[in-house]
């Protein structure tokens, strides 16, 4: 039987990838006008 720590690791691994890929996809879809505006107001 799989241990408790292994179950947590598997759940973490399965949950992190969709969040990471969605974040990367969202960042790549930001328009250049929004990036320019963010830079003009000194956002990181």
Image: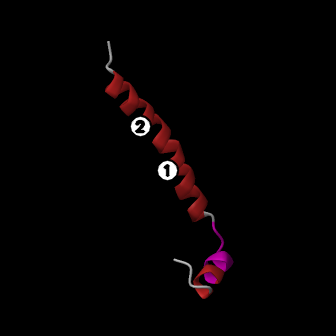
Number of the label disc, if any, that sits on residue 20: 1
Q: Foreground: 2 or 23?
A: 2
Q: What x and y, as percent, mark residue 21? A: 52, 50
User: Would you place residue 41 above or below residue 12 in this image?
Assistant: below
Kindly identify the residue that appears in the image at 31 percent across and 20 percent down.
3
Examine the structure image and report whether residue 3 is included in the region drawn in magenta: no
As drawn, 19 above or below 6: below
With 5 as the anchor, is 20 left or right in this view? right
| Residue sticking out furthest to the bottom | 40
Tell me the magenta residue range.
30-36
Q: Residue at x 57, y 56 (%)?
A: 25
Local SS, label 2: helix
Marks 2 and 1, how far apart in space? 11 Å
Graded by Cα atoms within 10 Å as few (under 14), some (14 to 19) or many (20 or more), the crowding at tag 1 reads: few
Q: Secondary structure at mark 1?
A: helix
- The tag on residue 13 is 2
Q: Quadrant of residue 10?
A: top left
- Mark 2 or mark 1, earlier in chain: 2
| Outermost residue, front side | 4
Quadrant holding the N terminus: top left
Does the segment drawn in magenta span residue 32?
yes
Circle 2 residues within 10 Å: few <14, some 14–19, many ≥20: few
Q: Is residue 4 left or right of residue 26?
A: left
Q: Residue at x 56, y 79 (%)?
A: 43
Image point (35%, 23%), residue name: 4
- List x then y, in percent, for residue 35: 61, 77
> How far across and how far down the image is residue 24, in percent?
52, 57
In the image, residue 34 sits, relative to residue 12, either above or below, namely: below
- Name the foreground residue: 13 vs 4: 4
Q: Nearer the viewer, residue 21 or 1?
A: 1
């Amino acid at each position: 039987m799989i241990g408790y720590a292994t179950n947590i690791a598997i759940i973490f691994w399965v949950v992190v990838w969709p969040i990471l890929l969605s974040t990367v996809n969202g960042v790549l879809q930001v328009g250049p006008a929004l990036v320019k505006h963010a830079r003009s107001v000194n956002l990181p």
